[in-house]
Amino acid sequence: MKIETVFNHYKKIEEILRCPICKEIINIVHPASATCINGHCFDCASFNYVNFIPNQKPTNYTKELFESRRIVLENNYYQPLLNELLRIIESYKKDEFTLLDVGCGEGYYSRAIHAQFDATIIGFDNAKEAIKLAGKSDNSIYWFMADLTNIPLKPKSIDFICDVLTPSNYQEFERLLSDDGICMKVIPGEQYLKELKKMVGLSTDGYTIDAVTDYFKTKMDLIDVKNIKYTKEVNDDDKIHFAKMTPLMLNREITELEVKELKECTFDFMILVGRIKEK
């Protein structure tokens, strides 16, 4: 992507950016960098993303993991979850809105939401390999490398937060959400990918969703809960990608032979929908 195009693109959301170092306003300056009034400068990469954590150490989340995840997601295994997220957005949206995809990975949910709604979509992750893939995939979305504890956006600049199977920072969420903003947090249910876990020897004992749900309710006013559970047959070509795409398998060498007998997977999710607590 040409640097001039990147500059013009990110200039459009300049007014909601803030410096993650000094919290001052950010300007997108030619040829393509995000610079605050105190001189802190962040590159707008030709891959169509802004790097707000330039000294970030490599994560355990590899390019191979995100490429496998992209294949699994684009082969529609998570379509029922996506459909429910789209329904929730439709229920609460205004004519114009801005949505933040937290831990967006390679950008599947951002792209799908943008295809459905005429909205400003911002996706961020702290993994460079994920954001590079995301930036290549859609040049109409705003992609950042950013820290969950220090998101480079101004207070009350976001109408929807979408947090799918990734950590949360409710202090930041509360700061960013508009007064009637909506937070959608997706957590794995107790049966999520149980067949895969069993096949590779990962225990499913002891996991419950109660602690995550209870904590959400201490930080947000819970206004809705959606439970989604279904089973899908796994295509032969996708079996190894299921094993490679999940963080559960980090630091484990999984072979195609190990997952050869994987016939189907259970998908089990809970979506918590909340607003900022009234004070």
Image (spheres, grey):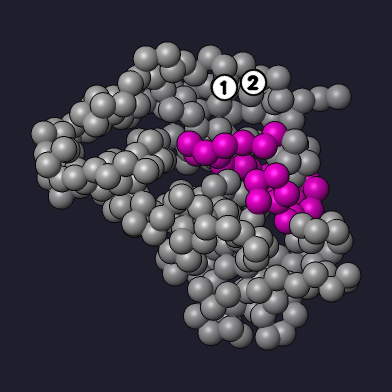
Where is residue 276 drawn, in percent x and y?
74, 30
Say what secondary structure mark 1 lies in: helix
Magenta region's main secondary structure? loop
Q: Is residue 128 magenta?
A: no
Residue 13 shows which numbered tag?
A: none
* Residue plotted at (78% across, 41% down): 175
In this rendering, position of residue 221 left or right of residue 45: right
* Residue plotted at (70% across, 19% down): 218
The part of the image, by quadrant, that contains residue 167 is top right
Residue 212 shows which numbered tag?
A: 1
* Residue plotted at (66% across, 74% down): 43
Work out how far the residue at label 2 is from the one at label 1, CA to CA, in angstroms: 5 Å
Can residue 134 be seen? Answer: no
In this rendering, position of residue 193 left or right of residue 228: left
* Residue plotted at (37% across, 43% down): 251
The part of the image, by quadrant, that contains residue 42 is bottom right
**Magenta part of the protein: which range?**
147-170
- How packed mark 2 is, by other alpha carbons closer than 10 Å (few <14, some 14-19, many 20 or more), is few
- State whether residue 139 is above or below residue 168: below
- Give the residue at mark 2: 215
Q: Is residue 151 magenta?
A: yes
- State whether residue 162 is above or below residue 276: below
Amino acid type, callout 2: Tyr
